[in-house]
Image (cartoon, grey):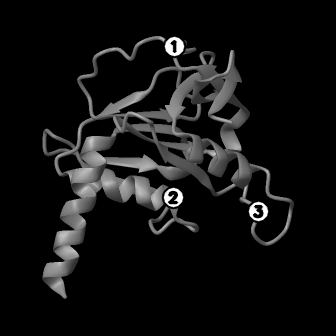
Amino acid sequence: MSEQLTNGGRRAFKHFLKFVVSGITAPFVYEVIESESKRIRDYLNIPTDDKSPSIDTEFVVFDTADSLLSIAVAIRHIDVVHFLEEPADHSPMDPLPEREDEALIYLQGQDEPYPISFDDPRQAAELISGLDSQPYYFDAFYSIVDDDGEMLSLNVAHIKLVEIEAEVVHEGQELLAHDQHRDN
């Protein structure tokens, strides 16, 4: 329902996902395209069977409508997802603050997100795609080298939500595809 009739004309609507994540006071609100909102709504509301998401191991992964962020949210930490439709001239979101880090990782038991800047954008792409694949293709810890050249290991089971600049993820995906093509 991206449009509604008003006075004989069409009124455009924007789509937002509002996540309330366990243990984090402020909700997360992201603008998404209509098809992503529907895909996530349908995915989370699959009747219990072999195709339903696993609460313990799966993530909801998507890009924001402006393609600035790639998001991964652990299903086990979602308390509420509110699927919002707002008139195109209205937004339930505050403007995003300027960021110095390419990624913010929200972890179980932590009040503040853990900021990360990647040494290689391939790591950002691997993290997002790894969280999107079931089961994870990495072990309990996912290790990266940060932009200072220092090793950082994330306990995947403690990740609640990940925000990564989509440009970094897409650059990493292109590099991985190039690497794979070169190796074949």
> Which numbered tag is attached to residue 132?
2
Please give the residue where the numbered disc 1 appears in the rendered image.
89
Q: Quadrant of residue 142?
A: bottom left
Where is 98 relative to 128, above or below?
Answer: above
Please give the residue where the numbered disc 3 appears in the rendered image.
52
Q: Name the front one of labels 1 and 3.
A: 1
Label 2: how many residues lie within 10 Å, few (<14), some (14-19) or many (20+)? some
The residue closer to the viewer here, 38 or 115, is 38
> x, y (%) of residue 36?
56, 46
Gap in angstroms between the C-alphas marked 3 and 2: 14 Å
Gap in angstroms between the C-alphas marked 2 and 1: 32 Å
> x, y (%) of residue 72?
51, 45
The residue drawn where x is 47% and y is 11% is 94
On the rendered structure, is 61 left or right of 80?
Answer: left
The residue drawn where x is 52% and y is 49% is 61
Label 1: how many residues lie within 10 Å, few (<14), some (14-19) or many (20+)? few
Type of amino acid under label 3: Ser
Secondary structure of the residue carrying numbered label 2: helix
Secondary structure of the residue carrying numbered label 3: loop
On the rendered structure, is 57 left or right of 101?
Answer: right
